[in-house]
Image (spheres, grey):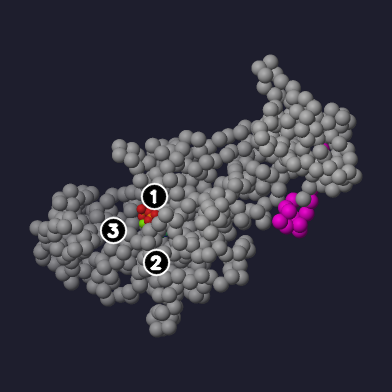
């Protein structure tokens, strides 16, 4: 199923706002109501709270655009806060990449950069307060025992034998937990709530665990760490967050977050849940993305096939196209999956306006124009972008020898094949009409060269005769081509929903082994040689391409961002 989309909107300019009124949604309805009631003095303070245990993906981008977008729209602010409560899985590399990605998307947290680990001392004091108030206790059950005691959805939990420890004993044990007197995992601090609650999150959840892990920022300062559940809501509270926006799986945690801030008597942010983004033909779980990286199924977090922001950037996606996508899919309360073709549609729209056109031949077939003088080079005029004349023109060298695509020739033409065949004529883009006189073959019978003639009276824009041909081909002169490595990509998985596995299978069983195709040496117009990593082009008839960061002078590497065929637009049209 595809998520409901607001009706088609006009193109948006590169920068924020784009002049169009932002669409409304249920979150804005809540905020508007709060402002009407002067709740929080009419302020809007949101946050994006990643856990630094992986790189950000397109789902996070949705959350970033939403949180920073609301702050911008309501003249409030949005914090970037690292929820770094699980040192075993967290790394500085992730913290740095997250900051880079948020900035790249076009958002700025200003001075509001925070870490949950900044609050560890405060959280510890609050834990002590809850112990004093008889609301928390030190429990000696093992992790396995705790699981058994917890009960199930249909069976109430059982109270821990340590539940009624005297306050003083709890205070003493908790302090000694902090001081490192007990082995990892031997004790926890638990909230004393209700083992019979219908909500399992309220069955005396863990607040602290003993874990001798080096924290990426604090090193070995602590050997006990607060759980995410004991950290998240209080961190929001400390930062005076007004609207704490998160994904649906936290709905069931909300009563616990509410319980903590109420027991502590501190600011109560309002949590609002929305549906997370899922995309077809990819996975979005950080655990699975990490596995793809660790097991070398992909070249890294920024492999252009990955749904990560760094992967999309390397692939050639622009920040504007991702923001536009996030805007268009909107926010909803029900889980759904968005067609990856919709994301591709957004980048096509953006690059169609921005990317200069250039000619590249991916599977070259040599053409010799026998009546064109040897050694002669003509510089022909070519428009850089028919969508935007202000992007000007360039010169393309034309010569006796050049390359066309192998696919653009058929020895025995199929029906309606309007490209080149023996005796047939086509126009070479920006140049002349040529006629195929002969196909030269190697010993194995493969066509290796075409001998053609050109008609000098048919020069593009200066034609002195009325001649029409049906096919127009792109080409590259053999005189000074830039030889480039071109990388073509397909979906990362062969199954629309790789998380929904058939019996006995794993998501990796649906890994698309043909998702990367490398063409080591493709002739491209020489202008590409001055392109820099990140520069984007439309290769005529082949799609949009972006210069890879591994490019070295003289040997450009180009990643195909997306082909020109817009399957999403087609599907939408069919449904209209
Ligand atoms: P983890 O399992 O490691 O917690 P996570 O994807 O939830 O993975 P976080 O770093 O906790 O990662 O996410 C940061 C923020 O991004 C959270 O507010 C989360 O709700 C939001 N988020 C994560 N995945 C998506 C998604 N697919 N769509 C929308 N928002 C998302
Ligand atoms: Mg999370």
In the picture provided, is 347 more to the left or to the right than 381? left
- Mark seen at residue 285: 1
Q: Is mark 1 on a helix, strand or loop?
A: loop
Vertical comparison of 300 with 163: above or below: above
State which quadrant residue 447 falls in: top right
Instruction: Give coordinates of residue 170: x percent, y percent.
Output: 15, 63
In the picture provided, is 472 more to the left or to the right than 93? right
| Residue range of the region highlighted in magenta in the rendering | 384-398
Instruction: Give coordinates of residue 175: x percent, y percent.
Output: 21, 61
Instruction: Give coordinates of residue 368: x percent, y percent.
Output: 79, 28
Q: Can residue 50 be seen in this view?
A: no
Disc 3 or 1, which lies upstream in sequence? Answer: 3
Q: Is residue 239 visible?
A: yes
Compare residues 356 and 301 and report the one nearer the observer: 356
Seen at 17% across and 55% down, the residue is 152
Seen at 51% across and 75% down, the residue is 75
Neighbor class of circle 2 (other Cα within 10 Å; few <14, some 14-19, many 20+) is: many
Q: Is mark 3 on a helix, strand or loop?
A: loop
Q: Does the residue labelled 1 lie within 8 Å of ligand 1?
A: yes
Compare residues 160 and 331 and report the one nearer the observer: 331
Neighbor class of circle 1 (other Cα within 10 Å; few <14, some 14-19, many 20+) is: some
């Amino acid at each position: 199923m595809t998520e409901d989309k607001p009706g088609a909107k006009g193109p948006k300019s590169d920068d924020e706002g784009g002049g169009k009124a932002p669409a409304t949604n249920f979150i804005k309805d809540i905020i508007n109501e709060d402002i009407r009631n002067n709740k929080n003095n009419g302020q809007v303070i949101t946050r994006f709270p990643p856990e630094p245990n992986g790189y950000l993906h397109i789902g996070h981008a949705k959350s970033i655009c939403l949180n920073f977008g609301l702050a911008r729209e309501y003249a409030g602010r949005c914090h970037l806060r690292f929820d770094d409560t699980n040192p075993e899985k967290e790394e500085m590399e992730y913290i740095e990449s997250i900051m880079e990605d948020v900035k790249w998307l076009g958002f700025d947290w200003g001075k509001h950069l925070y870490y949950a680990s900044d609050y560890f001392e405060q959280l510890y004091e609050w834990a002590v307060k809850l112990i004093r108030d008889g609301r928390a206790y030190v429990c000696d059950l093992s992790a396995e025992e705790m699981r058994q005691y917890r009960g199930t959805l249909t069976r109430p939990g059982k109270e821990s034998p340590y539940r009624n420890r005297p306050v003083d004993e709890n205070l003493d044990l908790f302090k000694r937990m902090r001081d490192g007197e007990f082995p990892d995992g031997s004790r926890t601090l638990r909230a004393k709530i209700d083992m019979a609650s219908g909500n399992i999150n309220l069955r005396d959840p863990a607040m602290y665990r003993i874990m001798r892990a080096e924290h990426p920022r604090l090193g070995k300062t602590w050997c006990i760490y607060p759980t995410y559940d004991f950290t998240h809501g209080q961190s929001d509270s400390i930062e005076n967050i007004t609207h704490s926006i998160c994904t649906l799986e936290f709905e069931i945690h909300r009563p616990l977050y509410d319980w903590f801030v109420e027991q502590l008597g501190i600011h109560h942010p309002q949590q609002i849940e929305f549906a997370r983004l899922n995309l077809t033909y990819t996975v979005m779980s950080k655990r699975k993305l990490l596995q793809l990286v660790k097991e070398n199924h992909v070249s890294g977090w920024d492999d252009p096939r990955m749904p990560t922001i760094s992967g999309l950037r390397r692939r050639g996606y622009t920040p504007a196209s991702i923001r536009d996508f996030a805007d268009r899919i909107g926010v909803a309360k029900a889980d759904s999956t968005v067609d990856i073709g919709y994301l591709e549609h957004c980048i096509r729209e953006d690059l169609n306006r921005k990317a200069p056109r250039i000619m590249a031949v991916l599977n070259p077939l040599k053409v010799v124009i026998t009546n064109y003088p040897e050694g002669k080079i003509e510089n022909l005029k070519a428009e850089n972008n028919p969508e935007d004349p202000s992007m000007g023109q360039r010169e393309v060298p034309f010569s006796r020898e050049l390359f066309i695509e192998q696919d653009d020739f058929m020895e025995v033409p199929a029906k309606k094949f309007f490209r080149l065949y023996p005796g047939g004529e086509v126009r070479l883009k920006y140049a002349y009409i040529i006629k195929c006189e002969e196909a030269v073959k190697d010993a194995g019978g493969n066509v290796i060269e075409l001998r053609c003639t050109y008609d000098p009276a048919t020069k593009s824009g200066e034609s002195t005769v009325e001649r029409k041909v049906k096919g127009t081909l792109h080409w590259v002169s053999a005189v000074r081509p830039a030889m480039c490595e071109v990388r073509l990509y397909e979906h990362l998985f062969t199954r629309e929903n790789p998380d929904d596995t058939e019996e006995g299978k794993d998501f990796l069983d649906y890994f698309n082994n043909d998702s990367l195709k490398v063409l080591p040496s493709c002739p491209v117009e020489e202008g590409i040689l001055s392109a820099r990593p990140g520069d984007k082009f439309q290769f005529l008839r082949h799609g949009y391409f972006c210069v890879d960061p591994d490019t070295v002078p003289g040997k450009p590497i180009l990643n195909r961002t997306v082909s020109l065929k817009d399957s999403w637009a087609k599907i939408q049209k069919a449904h209209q």
